[in-house]
Image (cartoon, grey):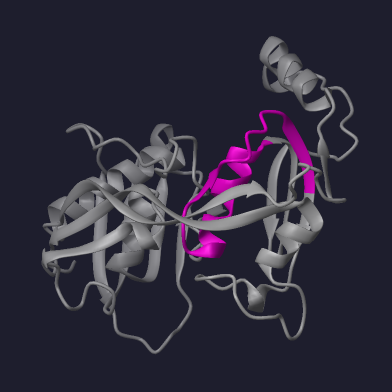
């Protein structure tokens, strides 16, 4: 069973400034059984859950958040169209979609969810590219020196990836001193092992409220450990001193020797053209 984070849509993939979204649903890729009901409880908890048996369960989510998960975009990429209903980000819904175990992969289920939203909510969306505020990840020091919490990665993760490619899932992998390869993010922390700075930057988007694009000019893979005070990691300009800890923006500069520079750039967005309340079942 896998829970999809509600504060973070799937961490942005590898499409430049665009989050990686599932392809439009083909006609034969759909849930075998689906149920939709409005949630009128006073509960504040919300959940999107993918289970290994091919079932997708959405509990107490607005259509805004369901769309965000279905299309794999950040909240700031969803923009209202002329006929977006006023309940789009207010009313909450429960959805159960049942697929075959063969279709239990998260991406396939999200594609099915797109089709379900189009069918039952009469959801119409349009993809556009708009110029929006972004943060550019740049070197903080004129001499290019990096901070104490970042260093170029060794060959361990590359060797592990090669061993897995040759031996499959059961391959015996060489030891990895940091214990993992890739990115781990928690509440007020991000750690990477052998990750490009472009990918690290994209993983900061949910915490900054903007896309983060790498403009450091550095092409190596890096190990890094970044920690900050979550209450200070606010979407918006990195101004003002932290009163109870280190802000995200200050931590990036002090610990990594990098800096987030406010700029503007083209960003892919999802325009909500229209939607209607579904017939409940």
Q: Going 49% across and 39% down the picture, which residue do you hit?
A: 13
**Residue at the bottom extreme of this rendering:** 42
36 vs 18: above or below: below
Q: Going 39% across and 35% down the picture, which residue do you hit?
A: 103
Which residue occupies the foreground of this view, 8 or 115?
Answer: 8
- Judge whether residue 187 can be spotted in this image: no
User: Looking at the rendering, which quadrant does residue 150 occupy?
Assistant: top right
**Quarter the C terminus occupies:** bottom left
Which residue occupies the foreground of this view, 212 or 51?
Answer: 212
Q: Going 17% across and 78% down the picture, which residue do you hit?
A: 86
Residue 6 percent across, percent down from the top left: 48, 64
Seen in the image, is 116 located left or right of residue 157?
Answer: left
**198 drawn magenta:** yes
19 vs 168: above or below: below
Q: Which residues are magenta?
A: 196-224
**Residue at the top extreme of this rendering:** 166
Residue 99 percent across, percent down from the top left: 34, 42
User: Looking at the rendering, which quadrant does residue 199 occupy?
Assistant: top right
Residue 262 percent across, percent down from the top left: 50, 59
- Judge whether residue 94 can be spotted in this image: yes
Seen in the image, is 134 located left or right of residue 272?
Answer: right
**Residue at the front extreme of this rendering:** 142
Seen in the image, is 233 located left or right of residue 127?
Answer: right
217 vs 128: above or below: above
Residue 233 percent across, percent down from the top left: 62, 71
197 vs 126: above or below: above
Q: Going 69% across and 61% down the picture, which residue do you hit?
A: 186
User: Looking at the rendering, which quadrant does residue 185 occupy?
Assistant: bottom right
**252 drawn magenta:** no
């Amino acid at each position: 069973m896998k829970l999809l984070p509600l504060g973070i849509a799937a961490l942005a993939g590898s499409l430049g400034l665009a989050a990686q979204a599932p392809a439009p649903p083909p006609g034969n890729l759909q849930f075998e059984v689906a149920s939709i009901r409005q949630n009128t409880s006073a509960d504040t908890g919300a959940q999107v859950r993918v289970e290994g048996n091919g079932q997708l369960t959405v509990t107490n989510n607005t259509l805004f958040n369901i769309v965000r998960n279905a299309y794999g975009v950040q909240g700031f990429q969803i923009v209202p169209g002329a006929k977006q209903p006023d309940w789009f980000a207010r009313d909450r819904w429960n959805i159960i979609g049942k697929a075959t175990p063969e279709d239990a992969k998260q991406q396939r289920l999200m594609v099915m969810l797109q089709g379900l939203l189009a069918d039952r909510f009469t959801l119409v969306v349009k993809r556009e590219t708009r110029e929006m505020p972004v943060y550019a990840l740049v070197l903080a020091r004129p001499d290019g020196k990096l901070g104490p919490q970042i260093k170029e990665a060794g060959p361990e993760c590359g060797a592990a990836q090669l061993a897995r490619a040759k031996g499959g899932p059961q391959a015996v992998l060489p030891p990895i001193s940091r214990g993992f390869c890739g990115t781990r993010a928690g509440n007020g922390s991000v750690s990477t092992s052998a990750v490009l700075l472009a990918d690290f930057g994209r993983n900061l988007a949910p915490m900054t409220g903007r896309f983060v694009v790498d403009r450091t000019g550095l092409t190596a893979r890096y190990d890094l450990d970044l920690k900050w005070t979550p209450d200070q990691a606010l979407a918006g300009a990195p101004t003002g001193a932290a009163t109870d800890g280190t802000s995200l923006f200050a931590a990036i500069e002090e610990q990594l020797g990098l800096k987030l520079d406010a700029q503007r750039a083209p960003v892919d967005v999802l325009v909500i053209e229209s939607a209607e309340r579904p017939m409940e079942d």
